[in-house]
Image (tube, helix red, strand yellow):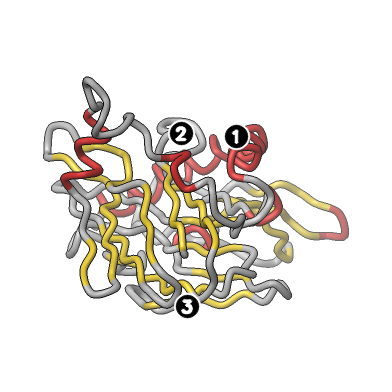
């Protein structure tokens, strides 16, 4: 239990770092992926790193994309991470999926270590979700650590109008979430199947863990399924690793 709360604390610390660096990083991502989630066809091979089978020396990325290609009966499976206990690989395999309208992509985490990933589609900088954000609360609100005898307290910053500002975890980053074209926020059940219309502002899987490895207190997510109803190219990233550490953890789905 204590280790799980330590993990949450580490996530908060990471989120604070992301909050500082996020604006610059997300601007770079948006420049690469365009302003819209669905951008039409013709860009699908941009994330197919590693050359082709015709290359004299196909890269290990190309070889792994080919090795893990898993498509059957209208379902394309994508691994969020791979590798073993010693060297987990923070990439999507395959990082490029081509399907037809009405077919499904299933993302899952097959790794041997309890390292989470997300599958996150966002329209522009305004819909990027940091792990930690600032919220306004009434001054009379008190906070008690969930860990007994913990040497900790929340960061409270005095704000205007007799209110405090507190830093807290962002549920839209940790949980499966959709924001539609009108700005309506919907939380999805863990491991659910969502149908993508192509007009959404934000789609997030939540933190996907290896099966049975999600820490207590976080949604028990080990997969995320999306059925695509509109043709186009849909770019996604892992927000756990994209900002600072692993900017290459991205992929796309081309729907024809």
Give the side of residue 107 with respect to residue 169, left or right: left
26 lies above or below 168: above
Residue identifier under label 1: 25
144 lies above or below 87: below
- 1 or 3: mark nearer the eye: 3
| Numbered disc total | 3
Q: Residue at x 20, y 39 (%)?
A: 64
Give the side of residue 83 with respect to residue 197, left or right: left
Dividing the picture into quadrants, the one containing residue 74 is bottom left
Dividing the picture into quadrants, the one containing residue 122 is bottom right
Q: Which mark is residue 195?
A: 3
Give the side of residue 83 with respect to residue 243, left or right: left
Residue 216 x %, y % = 28, 64
Q: Are marks 1 and 2 in contact (CB under 8 Å)?
A: yes
Precedes in sequence: disc 2 or disc 3: 3
For this orientation, the residue located farthest to the top is 56
Within 10 Å of the Cα at label 1, are there few (<14), some (14-19), or many (20+) other Cα atoms?
Answer: some
Q: Residue at x 20, y 36 (%)?
A: 63
153 lies above or below 172: above
Precedes in sequence: disc 1 or disc 2: 1
Within 10 Å of the Cα at label 3, are there few (<14), some (14-19), or many (20+) other Cα atoms?
Answer: some
Query: Is the N terminus in the top left, top right, bottom left or bottom right quadrant?
Result: bottom left
How far apart are the alpha carbons under marks 2 and 3? 27 Å
Residue 173 x %, y % = 50, 58
Residue identifier under label 2: 247
Within 10 Å of the Cα at label 2, are there few (<14), some (14-19), or many (20+) other Cα atoms?
Answer: some
Give the side of residue 192 with respect to residue 4, left or right: right
Residue 107 x %, y % = 31, 61
Secondary element at tag 1: helix
Secondary element at tag 3: strand
């Amino acid at each position: 239990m204590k280790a799980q709360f330590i993990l949450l604390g580490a996530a908060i610390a990471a989120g604070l770092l992301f909050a500082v660096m996020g604006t610059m990083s997300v601007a770079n991502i948006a420049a690469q992926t365009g302003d819209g989630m669905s951008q039409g066809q013709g860009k699908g091979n941009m994330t197919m790193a590693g050359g082709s089978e015709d290359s004299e020396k196909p890269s290990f990325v190309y070889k792994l994309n080919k090795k893990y290609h898993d498509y059957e009966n209208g379902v394309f499976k994508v691994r969020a991470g791979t590798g073993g206990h010693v060297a987990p690989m923070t990439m999507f395999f395959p990082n490029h999926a081509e399907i037809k309208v009405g077919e499904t992509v299933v993302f899952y985490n097959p790794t041997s270590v309890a390292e989470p990933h997300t599958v996150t589609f966002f329209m522009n900088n305004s819909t990027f979700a940091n792990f930690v954000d600032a919220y306004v609360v009434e001054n009379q609100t008190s906070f008690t650590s969930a860990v007994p005898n913990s040497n900790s307290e929340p960061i409270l910053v005095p704000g205007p109008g007799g209110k405090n500002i507190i830093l807290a975890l962002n549920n839209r980053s940790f949980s499966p979430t959709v924001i539609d074209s009108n700005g309506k926020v919907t939380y999805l059940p863990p491991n659910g199947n969502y149908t993508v219309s192509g007009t959404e502002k934000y789609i997030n899987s939540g933190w996907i863990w290896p099966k049975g490895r999600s820490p207590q207190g976080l949604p028990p997510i080990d997969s995320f399924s999306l059925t695509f109803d509109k043709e186009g190219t849909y770019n996604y990233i892992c927000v756990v690793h994209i900002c600072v550490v692993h900017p290459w953890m991205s992929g796309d789905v081309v729907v024809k």
